Image (cartoon, helix red, strand yellow):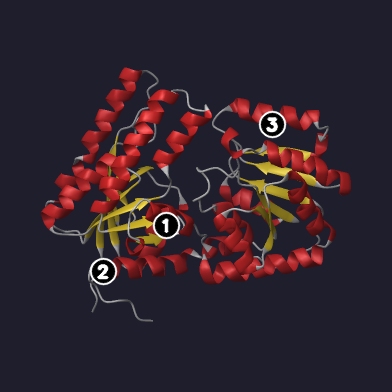
């Protein structure tokens, strides 16, 4: 019988991890298939969870973490984090792991590479976001508090990532097909890269009664679920909606989410006031994800405007997958993965990042609820076959088994 895998994973996530690409993919789906993982994670700010804890049939070694504002404080916190990363060497010495993996931590990747070579197991790197490119972009765009420092850091990290980490890794998992193309363009062989896009747990949605079946008339509600921070350019969506209500006066936009900076929300509310949207727009704030999904499930249309910038281009937007999983038609702008999802599924409309075009698409679906519902049903069917985390886990498991020299799983 095939031996189940055991992995040691160091990740930038805080304990306990809440992102679905960790909590659901690893903590539920892969664990249910008999695989076991031990983790090196960070505590939330304050360090109260520092220590060793059980996690998903494995263990988690959690390092204390505190956010410091001063330069000296930040250096001290970084050095403490580096010390925690060296735990990879200590934890791997017993030779109980089939692979060592690092997610989104650059110095830890160096430590993991050394540890993996010392014990003779593969070293994998998981890149979920173009961190160096984002740092460089923010510095050049003037939205970084320390542009010169971040510009230098960005270029140094980019060189370290592409010239050492990804070349040294035995395999690299990336966020999307677009990220695979971007990373390959930096000189990393395409056959060494596996895209693992964001998904959704249909089992979890079913338990909540959100199975994507067509419901009663949904009125004219439009829902956006996600971050409202400045970099997301939600001012675009507010201006779009000012055009929508000219054609559909009873339409209402619900913005579900928050921002790290409260002034970003204040600015959006000011814009809504200037455009005289009044009760046509609701700032619902952050909601528990189950409640947010339930609100989205009652919408006539769900939207995902994604500002076309180097930061977001390789992204795999979770919200679009969630919208489609609960059977809602979507309106998205032309972004690599959003376009692929809509074109492959027929689950909505994809337009340019243009206020008039985006508004026209929303109005089109509000005027024709039967067509909108049919789109929602097609989107749900596509997610069932391609983006449920059970499906994604099968792909990731097969890749791990191949890379670790284990026979594939047979149904």
Q: Which mark is residue 180?
A: 1
Q: Nearer the viewer, mark 2 or mark 1?
A: 1
Horizontal relation, residue 322 to residue 161: left or right: right
Is residue 306 visible in the rendered image? The answer is yes
Mark 3: secondary structure = helix
- Which residue sits at x=31%, y=76%? 408
Mark 1: secondary structure = helix
Residue corresponding to mark 3: 268
Point out residue 342 in the picture as x, y percentages from the top left corner: 63, 62
Q: Which quadrant of the figure contains the C terminus?
A: bottom left
Residue corresponding to mark 2: 4
Point out residue 155 in the picture as x, y percentages from the top left corner: 36, 35
- Which residue sits at x=50%, y=59%? 199
Q: Are marks 2 and 3 in contact (CB under 8 Å)?
A: no
Q: Which quadrant of the figure contains the N terminus?
A: bottom left
Q: Earlier in the sequence, mark 2 or mark 3?
A: 2
Point out residue 276 in the picture as x, y percentages from the top left corner: 83, 32
Q: Which mark is residue 328?
A: none
Q: Earlier in the sequence, mark 3 or mark 1?
A: 1
Q: Nearer the viewer, mark 3 or mark 1?
A: 1
């Amino acid at each position: 019988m095939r031996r189940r895998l055991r992995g040691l994973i160091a990740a930038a996530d805080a304990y306990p991890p809440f992102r679905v690409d960790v909590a659901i993919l690893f903590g539920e789906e892969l664990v249910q298939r008999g695989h076991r993982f031990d983790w090196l994670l960070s505590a939330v700010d304050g360090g109260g969870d520092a220590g060793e804890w059980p996690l998903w049939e494995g263990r988690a070694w959690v390092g204390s973490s505190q956010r410091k504002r001063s330069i000296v404080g930040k250096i001290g916190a970084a050095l403490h984090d580096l010390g925690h990363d060296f735990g990879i060497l200590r934890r791997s010495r017993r030779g109980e792991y089939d692979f060592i993996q690092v997610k989104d931590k650059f110095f830890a990747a160096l430590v993991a590479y050394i540890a993996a070579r010392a014990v003779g197991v593969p070293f994998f790197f998981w890149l979920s976001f173009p961190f160096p490119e984002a740092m460089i972009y923010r510095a050049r765009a003037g939205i970084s508090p320390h542009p010169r420092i971040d510009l230098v850091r960005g270029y140094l990290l980019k060189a370290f990532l592409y010239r050492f980490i990804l070349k040294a890794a035995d395999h690299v998992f990336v966020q999307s097909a677009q990220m695979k193309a971007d990373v390959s363009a930096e000189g990393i062989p395409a056959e060494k890269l596996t895209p693992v896009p964001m998904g959704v747990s249909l089992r979890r949605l079913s338990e909540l009664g959100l199975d994507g079946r067509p419901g009663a008339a949904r009125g004219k509600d439009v829902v956006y679920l996600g971050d409202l921070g400045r970099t997301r350019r939600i001012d675009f969506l507010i201006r779009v909606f000012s055009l929508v209500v000219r054609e559909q006066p009873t339409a209402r936009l619900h913005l579900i989410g928050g921002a790290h900076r409260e002034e970003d929300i204040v600015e959006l509310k000011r814009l809504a006031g200037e455009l005289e949207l009044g009760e046509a727009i609701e700032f619902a704030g952050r909601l528990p994800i189950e409640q947010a999904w339930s609100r989205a499930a009652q919408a006539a249309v769900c939207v995902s405007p994604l500002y076309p910038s180097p930061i977001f281009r390789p992204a795999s937007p979770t919200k679009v997958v969630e919208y489609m999983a609960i059977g809602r038609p979507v309106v998205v702008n032309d972004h690599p993965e959003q376009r692929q999802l809509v074109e492959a599924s027929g689950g909505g409309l994809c337009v340019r990042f243009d206020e008039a075009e985006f508004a026209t698409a929303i109005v089109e679906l509000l005027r024709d609820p039967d067509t909108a519902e049919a789109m929602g049903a097609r989107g749900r069917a596509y997610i069932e076959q391609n983006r449920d985390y059970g499906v994604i886990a099968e792909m990731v498991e097969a890749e791990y088994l191949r890379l670790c020299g284990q026979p594939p799983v047979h149904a």
